[in-house]
Amino acid sequence: MELILTTTVKIRSETSTLLPVKTDKPIEQEKLKKAMKKINKIEVSAPINVGDVIRRNFTEKGINLISTKTVER
């Protein structure tokens, strides 16, 4: 089974501490645990816009981790 992974990553910002993100394509269910270990190590800085790519080729080639929220500062 394949699923879109939705979760949060840490963000350095004046207004938020977490940024909601998702994969832009489904990933295999067996890879979710490995993906979450990678996500726990990610920290980004504001500003971030909806749709910005946080990590290219996140779990495998062609699957990106993208922002689902805009954080100005």
Image (tube, rainbow, N blue to C red):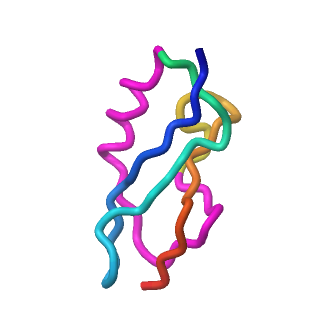
Which residue: 41% across, 62% down? 19
Quadrant containing the N terminus is top right
Vertical order, 49 against 31 (above or below): below
Residue lying at 56% horizontally and 60% vertically, measured from the top left: 68
Query: Looking at this rendering, what residue extends furthest in the right direction?
Result: 62
Q: Nearer the viewer, residue 40 or 3?
A: 3
Q: Quadrant of residue 27?
A: top right
- Residue 11, above or below 36: below
**In the visual, does 8 lie left or right of 26?**
left
Displayed quadrant of residue 51: bottom right
> Which residue lies at the image location 47% right of the left edge and 77% below the top edge?
71
Per the rendered image, the range of residues in magenta is: 30-54
The picture quadrant where one finds residue 73 is: bottom left
Please state if 17 lies on the left or on the right of 47 as rendered: left
Residue 35 at x, y percent in the picture: 43, 31
9 versus 60 height, above or below: below
Relative vertical location of residue 10 with respect to residue 62 in this rendering, above or below: below
Count of labels shown? 0
Residue beneath the point at 50% across and 18% down: 29
Q: Is residue 50 magenta?
A: yes
Nearer to us in this view, 69 or 73: 69
Foreground pick, 57 / 27: 27
Q: Locate residue 53, reporting x and y percent.
A: 61, 56
Relative to 32, is 65 on the left or the right?
Answer: right
Q: Is residue 12 magenta?
A: no
Expressed as whole percent of the image width and height from the top left, the position of residue 40 reads: 30, 44
